[in-house]
Amino acid sequence: MKISNNQSLLGGIESFSAYIIWGTSPLFWILLSNVSPWIIIGNRIVWSCVMMFVIVLIYKQAPQIKDIFRNKKDFSTLFFCGWLIFLNWSIYIWAICNEKVIDASIGYYINPLMVIFFSKIFLKEKFDKLKIVSIIIAATGIGIMIFRFGTIPFVSLGLCTTFAVYGLIKKKIKHSPVQTMFIENLVVFPFALAFLFISPESYSINLYGYILLICGGIITGVPLLLFASGIKKIKLSTQGYIQFLAPTITFFLSKFIFKENINQAQIMALFFIWIACGIFVISLFTQKKSV
């Protein structure tokens, strides 16, 4: 299906907005560093589900959601997506709370390459010469980062794999972002709520902490809605390159805010990655078809 230029522009804005929020989100989550990652994840699910429930009521989406529940294939797909994004959240929050911001960034740098690979294999998207060159350059930058660490850390591998598969599935889902997001949250909601009820730590958090945890639900839901909407309007490969924005922001935060050391190899990798992104942008302006 051909996508109009206006749709592509809107999808690009939505995607950029999502990744800017994700890139700057460590500034928020670090405020909860004294809270168990599992308590954060549980509250993240609960309050994100509450937010989506309110949106469902506002936009009167209940009838359509009932139809999804009746369709075993659609519900099964969203059930899988719900647990997939839960796993991604869990790895990410654990990384931030355990001072592994760099590992998280590497994971999200590897992720776009995996997304672009998926777009070629599963969606049969075609790449011109400039795109191929940009992929090689970006892969070189990623290779430098991996070589610096010796092996791909669990955090990096877990983040890139779960979100790349999630993005591929979301690209193919026909239902609206509001409907799919609500069901994805709903399938893990009972488990998160039960955990919070039985965990003693839930009852030791002060009012300020609970306010932050509630805000965490909003910070979780908004970028996912933007992502789910944007990915339907642009090519998956284009979405893959926009994803470089979030880890780049996180890298600079880790250097100037969290005071983590960024070595020469990591700086060189960033240099390669942004050259690749620049070439890719040029390719978008030189091709005739809309993206």
Image (tube, helix red, strand yellow):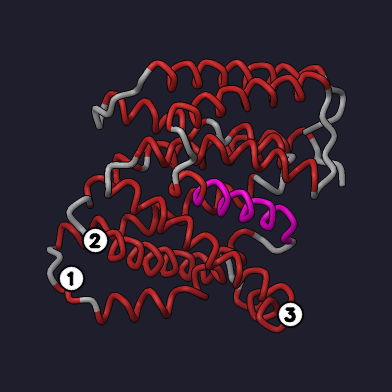
Mark linked to residue 289: none
Mark 1 and mark 3 lie on one chain; the one further toward the N terminus is 3
Q: Residue 5 or 184: which is nearer the viewer?
A: 184
- Estimate the x, y position of residue 88 in percent, counting from the top left: 48, 55
Mark linked to residue 36: 2
Q: Residue at x 33, y 42 (%)?
A: 100
Amino acid residing under circle 1:
Glu
Q: Is the magenta stretch mostly helix, strand or loop?
A: helix
- Estimate the x, y position of residue 58 in percent, counting from the top left: 52, 67
Amino acid residing under circle 3:
Asn
Quadrant in which residue 132 is drawn: top right
Distance in Å between CA atoms under marks 3 and 2: 37 Å
Which stretch did the figure color magenta? 158-173
Pair 3/2: label in front = 2
Mark 3 and mark 2 lie on one chain; the one further toward the N terminus is 2
Distance in Å between CA atoms under marks 2 and 1: 8 Å
Q: Residue 231 or 14: which is nearer the viewer?
A: 231
Pair 1/3: label in front = 1
Element type at marker 2? loop
Q: Which residue is drawn at 51% across and 31% down?
A: 245
**Label 1 sits on residue:** 201
Q: Is residue 182 above or below residue 4?
A: below
Residue 24 vs residue 64: left or right?
A: left
Quadrant in which residue 24 is drawn: top left
Element type at marker 1? helix
Q: Residue at x 33, y 29 (%)?
A: 253
Contact between labelled residues 1 and 2, with CB atoms less than 8 Å apart: yes
**Label 3 sits on residue:** 71
Residue 153 vs residue 141: left or right?
A: left
Q: Is residue 270 above or below residue 71?
A: above
